[in-house]
Image (spheres, grey):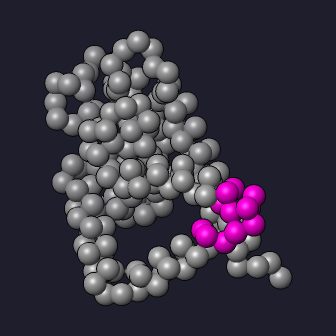
C-alpha cells in the first residue's frame, strides 16, 4: 500500500497538472499571451472595442469554456466561478481584474506555484514538510474560530459572484 505521503503528493501534483492544463486551455480560448502584444495588460482578454479602463469591471470575452457542474445543474454560480479568468488576469498583470473575477484566483495561483516546488523539494531532500503542513492545516481548520471566518469568507465570495451577476 502506498504511504500517505506519496498519495497526498501524487494527488496534489495531479491537481496542479490539471490546473495548468485548464489554464492553458483558457489562454488558448482567449488568445492570451504572457508576453502580451504591446497593448494594455488586459487587451488580449477584453472584447474588441471595449476598454478595461473605462469601467470598474473588465468585460471579458466569453470563449472560455465553462465546466462548473454546480452552475450547469443549478444556474447559480458557485463560490469558485470566475477563478480561472481571475488567474489569467493576474498572470497578465491586472490584479484588479483578477480581484474582480474571483479573489480566490490569488490563492489558487499561489497554490499552483508553491505546491509543486515544495513537493519537489521534499522529494529531493527526502523530507515530509508538505505532509506535515497539510496535517497541521487540517487540524487548524477543525477549530471553530478558524473554520467560521473561513466559511464566512467563502460565503462572502459567493455573494460577490451573485452581486457581479456572474
Q: Which residues are magenta?
A: 119-130
Residue 69 vs 52, above or below: the answer is: below
Residue 123 magenta-drawn?
Answer: yes
Chief SS of the magenta region: helix
Left/right of residue 22 with respect to residue 153 in the rendered view: right
**Residue 138 image position (x, y, % from top left):** 48, 80
- Count of number-bearing discs: 0
Relative to 73, residue 128 above or below = below
> Residue visible at 75% across and 58% down?
124
Instruction: Locate residue 75, reporting x and y percent.
Output: 35, 59
Nearer to me, 48 or 88:
88
**Direction from residue 23 to residue 93 in the image, left or right:** left
Q: Is residue 13 left or right of residue 111?
A: right
Specify whether residue 162 is in view: no
In the image as oriented, which residue stretches furthest toward the right?
1
Q: Is residue 48 part of the magenta span, yes or no?
A: no
Residue at point 20%, 25% (across, down): 53
The residue positioned 36% from the left and 14% from the top of the image is 39
The answer to whether any part of residue 110 appears in the image is yes
Tell me which corner region of the image, top left, top right, bottom left or bottom right, holds residue 70. bottom left
Which corner quadrant of the image does residue 54 belong to?
top left
Give the residue displayed 34% in from the left and 62% down from the top.
Answer: 79
**What x and y, as percent, mark residue 88?**
43, 38
Considering depth in this image, is 118 or 13 the residue closer to the camera?
118
As drawn, 141 above or below 17: below
| Residue 146 image point, x, y percent | 32, 80
Q: Nearer the viewer, residue 99 or 113?
A: 113
Q: Residue furthest front?
A: 125
Amino acid at each position: 500500500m502506498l504511504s500517505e505521503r506519496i498519495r497526498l503528493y501524487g494527488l496534489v501534483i495531479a491537481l496542479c497538472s490539471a490546473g495548468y492544463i485548464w489554464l492553458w486551455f483558457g489562454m488558448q480560448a482567449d488568445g492570451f499571451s504572457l508576453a502580451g502584444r504591446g497593448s494594455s495588460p488586459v487587451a488580449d482578454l477584453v472584447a474588441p472595442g471595449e476598454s478595461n479602463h473605462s469601467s470598474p469591471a473588465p468585460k471579458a470575452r466569453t470563449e472560455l469554456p465553462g465546466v462548473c457542474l454546480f452552475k450547469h445543474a443549478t444556474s447559480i454560480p458557485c463560490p469558485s466561478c470566475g477563478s480561472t479568468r481571475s488567474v489569467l488576469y493576474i498572470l497578465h498583470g491586472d490584479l484588479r481584474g483578477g480581484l474582480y473575477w474571483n479573489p480566490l484566483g490569488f490563492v489558487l495561483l499561489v497554490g499552483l506555484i508553491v505546491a509543486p516546488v515544495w513537493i519537489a523539494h521534499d522529494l529531493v531532500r527526502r523530507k515530509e514538510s508538505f505532509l506535515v503542513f497539510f496535517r497541521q492545516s487540517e487540524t487548524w481548520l477543525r477549530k471553530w474560530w478558524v473554520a467560521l471566518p473561513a466559511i464566512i469568507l467563502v460565503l462572502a465570495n459567493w455573494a460577490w459572484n451573485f452581486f457581479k451577476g456572474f
